[in-house]
């Protein structure tokens, strides 16, 4: 399983464990139960019969559907159930899932009266100890659950019929493979889709991709002139550069962009993480907290200087980050970021938090220029960018010898997971190794920017 997905699961578990404290003194029905067995169901029945008032992971089976309830609570003589979500928003899928669970539990004969979703409150700010009542939103969805009950049970019956078939039905791949979640069978069903499948058309909705595929388009290079007219600028460039197998270049626009940037440039990249549970004073769930940056400083004579900063794991990184960033970017030259809205968003946050650095931060923001612009404006498009302007596509397309494949950390979400994990890493060697991996990753991002900039320069000279 990819590390980012593991991190999402781990986060879900941590939030779930914390939410249990809203219902203290419960018993975990799944403790010691072997997975895929009926142990937790039997244990839940025993706990209810024994008069237990709060049960975690209460498990029930009805009509061959097994459900596990995060918290089942006997409150003022009535059973209520609570499902915990480690997100800031409640989605329709969350409501459907909890409603199906409600229907199943009621189907077993337990008179559960009310069903609630528990999720993180984005407006909560930590002041001292965590205040769980404020950290979590508790939303009743009982009326939705009753309204959805018959439709959901019908859908479950239909799915059981499909599961009972001797062979999987012949269904074409399509938008349903991503809705509401990416299907676990994508690897199997999608293995014959090629690099130019309409599902690889960037900036196009899944339903539009599905429509093209259903109409027999297996290779987007075969799209007609009429169909291309409806595409967005970048998707259009994706198709035409693939058709011609050549780079699209608007030399004049790139030249004037490079002239404005000047000859001395600082290439900057900031790394941040977003803990679901606020760890530091004044922070909220999923608040973006900068913890590292890398600067490659290209001087007029071509010399390249490098500085990388990673905050001490476990400490609130924001103040040191801000001071180090200001120090490392002193000067008057252009500061170039790839997608500067993200970097400027973080700097603006630090400005609010530390007003004493307001003018220094403002002067940095005034100097920023976006290296993404030549790509987002469609002045440069390489066929292997495949319509994407993400650095992860642009870098290997322009500088193939420099890529993330040999790095231990290959993307920003993995970097944030590793940094978050460092707070609990007691093994000094493992800790040093992970810090090195973070340094290596941050360094490649800005070194990659320098090399991209040089490729743009060489295109117009
Ligand atoms: S990937 Fe999943 S949703 Fe898509 S066709 Fe295969 S089984 Fe169905």
Image (spheres, helix red, strand yellow):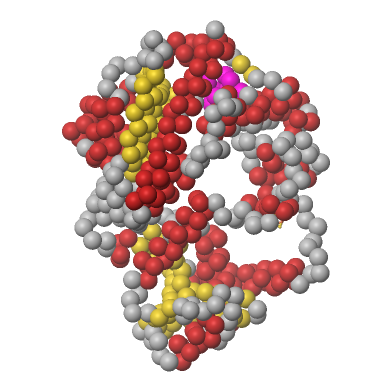
Question: At 50% across and 22% down in the image, what residue appears?
Answer: 451
The tally of labels here is: 0
Specify whether residue 205 is in view: yes
Question: At 27% across and 22% down in the image, what residue appears?
Answer: 330
Most distant residue in the front direction? 429
Most distant residue in the top direction? 461
The quadrant where ligand 1 appears is bottom right
As drawn, is 426 to the left or to the right of 252?
Answer: left
Q: Position of residue 298 (x, y in %)?
A: 39, 18
Q: Position of residue 179 (x, y in %)?
A: 62, 54
State whether residue 17 is above or below residue 92.
Answer: below
**Residue stretch rendered in magenta on the structure:** 374-381
Was residue 152 drawn as part of the magenta stretch in this picture? no
Question: At 74% across and 33% down in the image, what residue appears?
Answer: 220
Most distant residue in the bottom direction? 50
Question: At 63% across and 36% down in the image, what residue appears?
Answer: 202
State whether residue 458 is above or below residue 391.
Answer: above
Q: Position of residue 320 (x, y in %)?
A: 25, 38
Quadrant location of residue 395?
Answer: top right
């Amino acid at each position: 399983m990819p590390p980012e997905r593991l991190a999402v699961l781990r986060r879900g578990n941590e939030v779930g464990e914390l939410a249990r404290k809203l219902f203290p003194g419960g018993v975990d029905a799944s403790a010691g139960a072997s997975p895929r067995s009926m142990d937790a169901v039997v244990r839940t029945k025993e706990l209810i019969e024994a008069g237990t008032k709060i049960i975690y992971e209460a498990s029930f089976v009805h009509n061959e559907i097994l459900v596990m309830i995060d918290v089942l609570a006997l409150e003022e003589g009535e059973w209520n159930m609570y499902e915990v979500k480690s997100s800031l928003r409640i989605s329709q899928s969350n409501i459907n899932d909890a409603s199906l669970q409600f229907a199943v539990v009621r189907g077993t004969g337990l008179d559960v009266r009310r069903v609630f979703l528990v999720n993180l409150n984005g407006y909560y700010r930590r002041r001292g100890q965590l205040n769980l009542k404020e950290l979590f939103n508790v939303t009743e969805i009982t009326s939705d659950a009753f309204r959805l009950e018959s439709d959901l049970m019908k859908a479950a019956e239909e799915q059981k019929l499909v599961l009972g078939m001797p062979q999987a039905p012949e269904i074409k791949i399509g938008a349903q493979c991503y809705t509401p979640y990416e299907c676990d069978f994508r690897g199997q069903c999608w293995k014959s889709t090629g690099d130019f499948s309409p599902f690889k058309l960037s900036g196009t909705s899944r339903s539009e991709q599905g429509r093209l595929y259903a109409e027999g388009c297996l290779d987007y290079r075969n799209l007609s002139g009429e169909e291309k007219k409806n595409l967005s600028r970048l998707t259009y460039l994706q198709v035409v550069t693939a058709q011609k197998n050549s780079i699209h270049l608007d030399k004049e626009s790139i030249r004037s962009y490079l002239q404005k940037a000047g000859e001395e440039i600082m290439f900057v990249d900031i790394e941040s993480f977003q803990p679901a549970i606020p760890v530091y004073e004044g922070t909220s769930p999923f608040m973006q907290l900068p913890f590292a940056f890398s600067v490659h400083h290209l001087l007029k004579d071509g010399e390249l200087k490098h500085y990388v900063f990673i905050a001490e794991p476990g400490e609130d990184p924001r103040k040191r980050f801000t001071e180090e960033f200001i120090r490392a970017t002193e000067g008057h030259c252009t500061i170039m970021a790839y997608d500067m809205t993200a970097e400027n968003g973080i700097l603006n946050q630090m400005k609010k938090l530390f007003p004493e650095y307001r003018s220094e931060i403002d002067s940095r923001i005034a100097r920023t220029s976006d290296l993404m612009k030549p790509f987002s404006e469609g002045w440069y498009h390489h066929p292997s960018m495949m319509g994407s302007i993400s650095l992860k596509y642009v870098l290997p397309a322009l500088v193939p010898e420099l890529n993330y494949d040999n790095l231990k950390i290959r993307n920003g979400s993995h970097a944030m997971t590793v940094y978050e994990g460092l707070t609990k890493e007691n093994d000094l060697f493992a800790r040093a190794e992970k810090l090195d991996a973070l340094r290596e990753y941050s360094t490649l991002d800005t070194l990659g920017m320098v090399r991209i900039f040089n490729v743009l320069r060489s295109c117009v000279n």
